[in-house]
Amino acid sequence: MNPRYALLAAPLLFAAALPLSAQLTILSQFDPSNTGGTCGIAYNSPAGEIMVIGCSASTIDRYAEDGTFISSATMVGGSANDVDIDMSPSDLTMNGTFVAQGQLLLVNGESGVAEIYAIDEATNAVIDTLAAGFGSSHVVGGSYHPQRGTFFLVQDNVPGGFEENRVAEIDATTGDTLQTFSVQPYFDVNYGDLDISPISGHLFIVSSSDDGIAEFTADGVFITEHVLPVGVSSLSGIALDNDLQGAWVCNTGGVVYKLGNFPIGISEEIAADPFIQVFPNPANDRVELVLDVERSAKYSIVLHDVAGRAVQVVFNGTLPTGSRRIPLDVSALNVGCYSVLVSGPGVSIPRSLIVAR
């Protein structure tokens, strides 16, 4: 088991410029009798069952919603401190193998790159395994994105430098890394997890070193941080209950909470913003920026380096409503991380871009 560094100082929050966060509430809670400090949680909505995995545990434990212990299943892939479980939110194909909706997904990020296991929910047999091209022995959470058909993984703050506090989008067939972005300076991940809304496609990230739940778009744009209710802290896992707009969360002390008033859908403020995608990412010569603009106005698109310095003005003018494709030549840029910033009336939307050779 890898040692943990001391908790970092609380991240900077730019609350004045952010959309209002949801006022989360506690609907219920229980302390799992057969599980100690928890590192991952999954929710089986049809059965009304919660599955939790303890840190470095050898079993996955199943509970009813009132906290009644039901059964245990053997942990696959070996016990791990950096681990997560989830339910497949839709039918998917992983590593070329069909995985039906409602099967158990397990992410083991304890050693080297992360491994994703698809497990038969009824028999605990491994359906298939995907070796992800991401991770530095500290991937602590992950989930499948039903709209994009990819996996998203989150790594904690232990590796340091470029590798720390990163989210990666993973090809479900090959395991290749499609894009990565940092959750800093908005959030800091120690023990933690992420889950994905099937409605908005947004990522919700929890951490034992933060008193909120960070919401990001799938392209790495920070939306806001939802403050936890009084009495809830040190979260290590999250599993959305999409039907009731709630979330099951667990903490490093082993307590499981059901949170209400969870923002599963898209807020009107975010939906009105121009949406931009960057393809390919990482890139080595040419990039295409794809924008879907819902409000015609004057916008600027500026490329910044990792230090925040403007490198190139990509576009400056009026964008009509509808879809627009803008080419960007990055062949002369140094290898590294950049940010494409779209600015307009009342909006400022960054997208991460990695230049690789």
Image: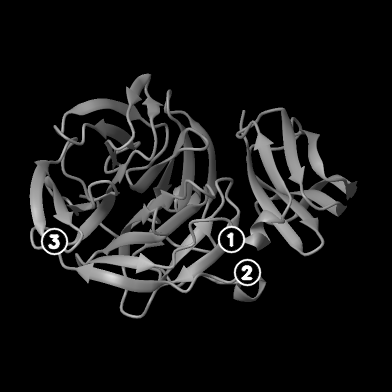
The residue positioned 73% from the left and 59% from the top of the image is 348
Identify the image quadrant of the C terminus: top right
Q: Which mark is residue 18?
A: 2
User: Which residue is farthest top?
Assistant: 96
Q: Are marks 1 and 2 in contact (CB under 8 Å)?
A: yes
Mark seen at residue 73: none
Query: Quick check: 93 above or below 115?
Result: above
Per the model, the C-alpha gap separating discs 2 and 3 is 36 Å
Out of 294 and 255, give the one closest to the viewer: 294
Query: Would residue 202 appear left or right of 118 to someone viewing this image?
Result: right
The residue at the far right in this view is 317
Q: Is residue 189 visible?
A: no
Q: Residues within 10 Å of mark 2 (few under 14, many from 20)?
A: few
- Kindly identify which numbered label has been placed on residue 223: 1
Give the mark nearest the N terminus, 1 or 2: 2
What residue lies at 16% left-to-right and 50% top-to-bottom? Answer: 56
Q: Which residue is mark 3?
A: 36
In which quadrant of the rendered view does residue 245 lie?
Answer: bottom left
Q: Give neighbour class at mark 1: few <14, some 14-19, many 20+ (Cα, 10 Å).
A: many
Residue 308 x/y as whole percent:
70, 57
